[in-house]
Amino acid sequence: MPNVRNRFLNAIEFRDVYLAYGDRVILNHVSFNVRFGESKIVMGGSGTGKSTICRLVLGLIKPDDGQIFVDGEDITKMREEELMQVRQKIGMVFQEGALFDSLSVFDNIAYRLREQRRPEDEIEQVVTRMLRFVDLEQALDKMPNQLSGGMRRRVGIARALVGSPKIILYDEPTAGLDPITARTINELALKLRDLEDVSSIFVTHRLQDIEVLANEYVVRDDRGNLVFKKEDDTLCLINTEFLMLKDGHIIFSGSDE
Ligand SMILES: Nc1ncnc2c1ncn2[C@@H]1O[C@H](COP(=O)(O)OP(=O)(O)O)[C@@H](O)[C@H]1O
Ligand SMILES: [Mg+2]
């Protein structure tokens, strides 16, 4: 009954979260939530705590005060074994792609499945499906150093999608990419939001990311082709909201109006 649950629960919720390193306050009693199916764009200058938010959601660090809920569960006091379960629901896309240089594209994406000792034919199926999703089927035998920056980023996304996580954290996934390559990353995020109902936090400084995620959506036409559309003024279906951080506080939160 996922739909019934979804109406009552948030994918992610920060409740009065406080975190400081020494006397440097990073998050000063911050509260926000990410609804199911929503993309939350997180903006803010360098060092304002954007990556820290991702690390908190993954339970890699704990807040000094307040609570963090993931898929309805309070993760704040969880032990490592329980956190591992929660992390299975989350895909993480890092700025650099963070691939293993000594492994091929295929093996990078297969990594988590091999760790879980899945049968090889299942691994092949999943990896092929992920590569098709990011439009990189032709690159499966390549090594990371043979790929362009944008391709590496897409492999990083394919790897994050293994296990079909319902929550994805993108930490500046388009930083340093040219506009056309960045667009391919934006389109993947739209596909995940609009076709797979993924909830996400999307950290970015980039105006282009914000424009695409706030104004475009994707549907499948009768033939199964993807069609990217721009929102017209009368329509407001797009499931993207914003959060802007400064000096430990949220200084803006809401939609793009
Ligand atoms: N382990 C740590 N110890 C001390 N300070 C840290 C630690 N991790 C992060 N910080 C500081 O916390 C602030 C927020 O970091 P981060 O969330 O990575 O910023 P950004 O918004 O650029 O992603 C930065 O000033 C950073 O230097
Ligand atoms: Mg960061």
Image (tube, rainbow, N blue to C red):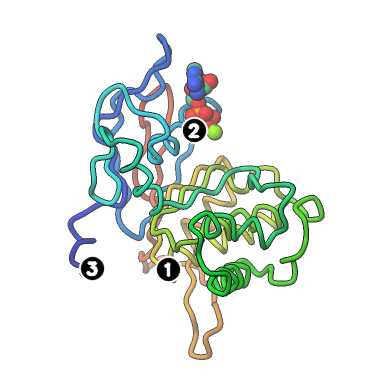
Q: Alpha-carbon neighbours of circle 3 within 10 Å: few (<14), some, or many (≥20)?
A: few
Callout 2: helix, strand or loop?
A: loop
Q: Which residue is mark 2?
A: 44
For label 2, being within 8 Å of ligand 1 is answered yes
| Ligand 2 falls in quadrant | top right
- Residue closest to the eye, 240 or 53: 53
Look at discs 2 and 3 and give the one toward the viewer.
Answer: 3
Residue 27's x, y, as percent?
37, 25
Query: What residue is shown at x 63% (from left), y 59% (from top)?
Result: 183
Q: Amino acid at mark 1?
A: Glu
Q: Alpha-carbon neighbours of circle 2 within 10 Å: few (<14), some, or many (≥20)?
A: some
Query: What residue is shown at x 35% (from left), y 60% (from top)?
Result: 37
Observer able to see residue 203: yes
Callout 3: helix, strand or loop?
A: helix
Query: What residue is shown at x 36% (from left), y 31% (from top)?
Result: 250
Residue 202 horizontal side relative to residue 35, left or right: right
**Which sits earlier in the primary sequence, circle 2 or circle 1?**
2
Residue 127's x, y, as percent?
59, 68
Residue 90 — which label?
none
Q: CA distance from mark 2 to mark 1?
A: 28 Å
Q: Above or below — where is 75 with respect to 118?
A: above
Q: CA distance from mark 1 to mark 3?
A: 14 Å
Q: CA distance from mark 2 to mark 3?
A: 33 Å
Instruction: Tell me, yes or no, whether the two marked residues, 2 and 1, touch with CB atoms within 8 Å.
Output: no
Q: Which residue is mark 1?
A: 196
Q: Amino acid at mark 3?
A: Asn
Residue 3 — which label?
3
Residue 120 horizontal side relative to residue 101, left or right: left
Callout 1: helix, strand or loop?
A: loop
